[in-house]
Amino acid sequence: MQQFLWHRRAVLGAMTALGARPLTALAEPFTAQADPFALGVASGDPSRDGFVLWTRLVGPGAQPLLAGAIPVRYEVAEDDGFRHIVRTGEVRADPQAAHSVHLELAGLRPGRAYHYRFHALGATSPVGRTATVPDRADRLRLALTSCQHWELGWFGAYRDMLAGDPDLIVQVGDYIYETSYPDQPKVRDFGAPEPRDLDGYRARYALYRTDPDLQEAHRRVPWLVTWDDHEVLNDYAALANREGLPPEIFAARRAAAYQAYFEHMPIRPSLWRSMASPRLYRGVDWGELASLSMLDTRQFRSNPPCAAPSVARNVRLDHCAERLAPDRTMLGQAQEAWLAQRLSQERRPWTLLAQGVFFAPLALDGGGDAVYSDQWDGYVAGRSRLLDQLARPNVRNPLILSGDVHSFWLNDLHRADGTPPVATEIVTSALAAQSPPAGRFGEVRANNPHIRFHDLNHSGYVRIEIEPTRLVAQFRALNLKSARAKPKILQQVEQDIR
């Protein structure tokens, strides 16, 4: 208990520095020597009457500012010329939060586009575009993305993504990578060692935010995000980790990584400050068309099955009985209860769950006894409980959106063998990362008849368009080694309402 409380205080203490607050006296006068908005602007977590606006002030070379609190003025308008300004005010960027700003707005008109900008240190930010959620909608366009390794690929897929005019970009984890892979060919370099503390993680996010394609995607479209493992350390599960560090040691690294994640993402600070632990699970309901629940599959999961204490690595399990234990959970009790409550009240024709890791069973052998530990196959009871919730009569067309495995998949989800599917899973490939090695998943189709499509050789993202009676998903592949790659449609899936 002491370890948990220490970790909770470490994270929540850092969170108090985040978010918009009234301006107070500055620690010292300061004048920028370069563009303080070099990391751009972003918006996210839209609702029917608001959204979150983000920016972070930086010094030359996107380095941290050596300054106290800095006043930041903001403007929100109905037009990009800012002739019809609907909100203006002043907040502060604190050094405790790396001079990031999270402005949580409410009371705006539903279903409207808005433009915003910040002013600080004599400079003006780029003009961002965002939108509130409509009360009534006959269409929702999503871009589903995951896994972007700075060194292993260009982020040009965002140009194709923006060409599709999405209403929302859904990022399901591995926004950054902490690890360099020396055996893989690089298109650019991290220029720094693996991050292990707050300064290291902040620098990694700042590097990512200098990418012009990623920056433009944040500027033009609201995002809904969650983390997977590389935002902290590959394959970690709760406080178990691949280095086998004791929980009280790994907790400090995880707290630093979580703080840096929040400092660089357009996430509502009210969620973080009001909860017993950092919270990412939340919902966005798109009028009467679709509900979208964003899940956290890392922070609250049970210890990895058939593993040494404090150790978490994605390994092949053969006949591991522990993974079948009835108390195993991927989401934790509180998140499971929250999701069950949302699903019990579902009334919309489409129900979307977005989360980090492969959900469907993925047998590596003919008997189904060999699986990978890091996926929902290591948490079978938790998966069964969720499928039971998705089988409710009021949940008519459930769709699970996943990432992590650097490949494209389309899976039917069954409660038991021989029964009709209760949901569909769409798995996006990596936006920019290496493909899986040959043979990693065995004889996929022979061992897994519920898998309708898979592609292990291409990177890209998934474009999804939802209408009241129809959903269309395109698996769009791009050459991540080319800065100007053109898309290739690998598969188009159409699903009518049940």
Image (cartoon, grey):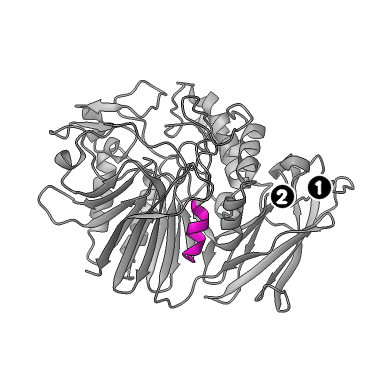
Residue annotated with mark 2: 38
Helix, strand or loop for disc 1: loop
Q: Quadrant of the C terminus?
A: bottom left
Residue drawn where x is 47% and y is 43% of the image: 432
Is residue 161 part of the magenta span, yes or no?
A: yes
Query: For the magenta stretch, what is the residue range?
Result: 157-166
Give the residue furthest to the left.
418
Residue 113 placement, left or right of 80: left
Judged by its main secondary structure, the magenta piece is helix
Q: Is residue 374 above or below residue 478?
A: above
Q: Is residue 40 above or below residue 234?
A: below
C-alpha span from label 2 to label 1: 8 Å
Residue drawn where x is 38% and y is 27% of the image: 313
Residue annotated with mark 1: 34
Picture coordinates of residue 241, whole percent (x, y):
45, 27
Picture coordinates of residue 412, whole percent (x, y):
22, 52
Residue 58 placement, left or right of 251: right
